[in-house]
Image: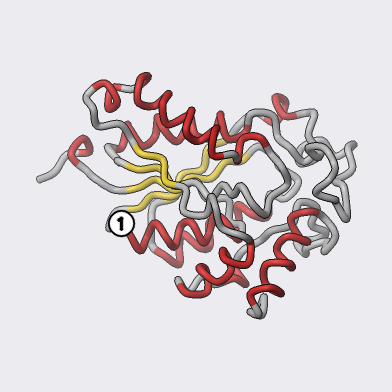
């Protein structure tokens, strides 16, 4: 009988959005053992978590939800309702106020602890460096640096068995992500990609909505 320390498999950072769901389905195509982890920080688009719950039930995989005190994220419009979410965002602008300070640093830190505790060998994260909002924690350089931190700051790394960060969407356009998701049979209708939903429905004007629409239009695939 295998113990947790002997288990192999993957932990997937899973928000319930288009990218993370495609990443989850990709991880499932490569691994027999997959666990999903979502983060609840009282985000304005918290409906994502409900989507994530339904998807993990559908897929019959373990789902961990980590709650984070939203007070540490008060300077982002995704948490502070007094800050308006920008609409019709231009890629020529500076990093938008939807940026959540150090979010992926924190999320990957939690993920590393969880994965090492469960004996999982890989962490999947759906970061993207092409069609995104310009967040610094989505860059290849950041992922490379965090991978090095895992290698030198964990027991698994010290034993030369460092947990590996997998970023299958890193260099894909939104069009290519939609095409990949379609190939993997991702149920797009069960995902959510809006930063500022109204009664659970996408606003259609925020950066996340516009990028999603762009991806489906360019891919020639209907967003059901």
| Horizontal side of residue 122 vs 161, given as left or right | right
Quarter the C terminus occupies: bottom right
| Horizontal side of residue 158 vs 89, given as left or right | left
At 67% from the left edge and 75% from the top edge, which residue is drawn? 223
What residue occupies the far left of the structure in this picture?
A: 1
Residue 151: quarter of image:
top left
At 83% from the left edge and 59% from the top edge, which residue is drawn? 198
Q: Position of residue 32 (x, y in %)?
A: 27, 58
Q: Position of residue 189 (x, y in %)?
A: 62, 72
Residue 131: quarter of image:
bottom right
Q: Is residue 193 above or below residue 64?
A: below
Q: Secondary structure at mark 1?
A: loop
| Horizontal side of residue 39 vs 91, given as left or right | left
Please give the residue where the numbered disc 1 appears in the rendered image: 31
Q: Is residue 26 above or below residue 9?
A: below
| Horizontal side of residue 34 vs 97, given as left or right | left
Residue 161: quarter of image:
top left
């Amino acid at each position: 009988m295998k113990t947790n320390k002997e288990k192999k498999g993957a932990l997937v950072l899973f928000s319930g959005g288009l990218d993370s769901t495609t990443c989850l389905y990709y991880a499932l195509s490569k691994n027999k053992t997959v666990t999903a982890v979502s983060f609840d920080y009282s985000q304005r688009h918290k409906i994502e978590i409900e989507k994530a719950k339904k998807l993990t039930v559908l897929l019959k995989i373990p789902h961990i939800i980590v709650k984070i005190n939203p007070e540490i994220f008060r300077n982002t419009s995704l948490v502070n309702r007094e800050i308006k979410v920008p609409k019709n965002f231009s890629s020529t602008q500076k990093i938008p106020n939807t940026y959540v300070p150090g979010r992926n640093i924190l999320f990957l830190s939690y993920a590393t602890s969880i994965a090492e505790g469960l004996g999982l060998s890989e962490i999947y994260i759906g970061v993207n460096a092409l069609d995104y909002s310009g967040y610094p924690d989505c860059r290849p350089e950041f992922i490379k640096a965090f991978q090095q931190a895992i290698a030198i700051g964990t027991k698994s790394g010290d034993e030369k068995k460092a947990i590996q960060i997998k970023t299958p969407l890193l260099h894909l356009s939104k069009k290519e992500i939609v095409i990949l998701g379609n190939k993997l049979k991702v149920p797009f209708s069960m995902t959510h990609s809006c930063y500022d939903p109204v009664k659970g429905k996408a606003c259609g004007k925020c950066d996340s909505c516009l990028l999603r629409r762009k991806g489906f239009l360019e891919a020639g695939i209907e967003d059901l």
